[in-house]
Amino acid sequence: MEQLHEHNQKTYENICRMYGESIQRIAVVQPTGSGKSLLMAKLIEDNPDSRFFVLSTSHKINDQFKSKLDEKMLERVECNIYCNMPNMKQEIMESLQPDYIFLDEMHRALAKEWSKGINVLLNMYPDAKVLGLSATPIRYLDKCRNVAEELFGGNLACDMSLSHAILDGILPMARYVCGVYSYEKDTESLNKKIEKSCNSDEEKKELLKELKILKENLDKGHGVSDIFKKYIVSGNEKFVVFLKNTTHLRIMKPVIEKWFLDAGFTVRMYEVHSKNTDKDKEFQAFKADMEDGIKLCLSVNMLAEGIHGDIDGVIMLRETISANMYFQMIGRAFACGKKTIPLIFDLVANSQFISDASDVSFPSELRGEIEKRKKECEKEGKEYEVGFDVDEFIVMDYFMDVVSGFREIEGRLQWRRCRELPV
């Protein structure tokens, strides 16, 4: 079995100590790519007389986890997925008899329907040791519920953010490039909103002037092909592209191909989505493709959790205001021991939308953690060294200021009912 990383060894020792102190439910918060699944495998290996029940979000994740175990270990492990829990028959649940219950991506355990079956399971086996693992324990769009508090009583064997892992050298720093692939419709839509608003003619004229300047700034920004050509270097070959739905995938597939061809790359694309009956074969072919050129896995509602490792970067074409989904998507780019710089192309301004909705995004979290460490060092009369130039890794281009400008203009529009004055 793969050995634990140094940071995971400390977490594992904490888990064993806490179970030894009769703490039945323990949570582990670690970023994607930091080796959380190795903790589960190590517990299975070190407890040969125990039975284990593993819950995750997909069979693909379960298969990936089971590949870490030998045949004898597999005999003591049952795996299932969260969405099956509400309808699991009682006789099946009674046959599990687990000594340990693992809740991978534990934030999903609080989902309204899924939680019903999980609560039945936990109540059926009150003496089972429960281990929850997630990179994103806060359900930001569900009243900011914290699964580590609700299900695990705040019993944390590890509490490590993505920024923490990067600044401590556990994970490599990624280059985060925020650009834009489509803004014509946005500017056209905002232009129409200004015209239809109840602002005065003078105000409309000023707003349209500001919008024109913002659009000119966007026109000065780098195109997507230029961005790819500038930042994709030797060793960056495999990317997961996140799209909204299969219609979006069909529309964008030729566009994506042209971006890479115009940037001077050859490109091969694989599709992973529920409507593709060969999705598993496609994903395996993507992973196995070692030929020259860029390899893209076009994903719709898949691969956002649990799958990482041999991936050099992600391209976000799927908009989201969910901080959980956002961090799961960018998390595909990270893995311990990665030799190349992971690349994250945010082409839909998710970092801006996430910051507005949840006051957290990768750039803001990283800068916040750096400032926190600087202040802590200042108190001790020391100077904190980051180890890399943040501005070289967080590249916002012209786009982010323009997105903020669009929103500021929209916020100034007046929509009170316009009435004609009587003659």
Image (cartoon, rainbow, N blue to C red):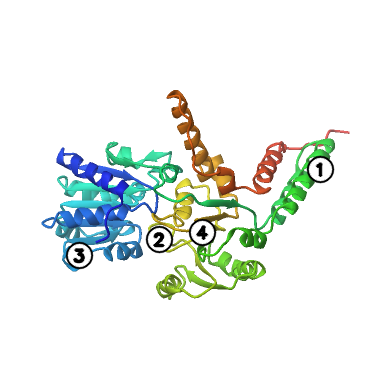
Residue at label 1? 209
* Circle on res. 309: 2
Ranked by sequence position, the earlier of labels 3 and 1 is: 3
Single out the mark in the foreground, 3 or 1: 3
Q: In the rendered view, does 249 fall on the left or right side of 398?
A: left
Camera sees residue 384: yes
Where disc 4 sits, the SS reads: strand
Q: Residue at x 54, y 65 (%)?
A: 234
Location of the C terminus (image quadrant): top right
Where disc 2 sits, the SS reads: loop
Marks 2 and 4 close (CB-CB < 8 Å): no
Ranked by sequence position, the earlier of labels 2 and 4 is: 2
Q: Residues within 10 Å of mark 3 (few under 14, many from 20)?
A: some
Q: CA distance from mark 2 to mark 1?
A: 48 Å
Q: Amino acid at mark 4?
A: Val
Single out the mark in the foreground, 2 or 4: 2
Q: CA distance from mark 1 to mark 4?
A: 36 Å
Ranked by sequence position, the earlier of labels 3 and 2 is: 3
Residue at label 3? 74
Single out the mark in the foreground, 3 or 2: 2
Q: Amino acid at mark 1?
A: Lys
* Circle on res. 314: 4
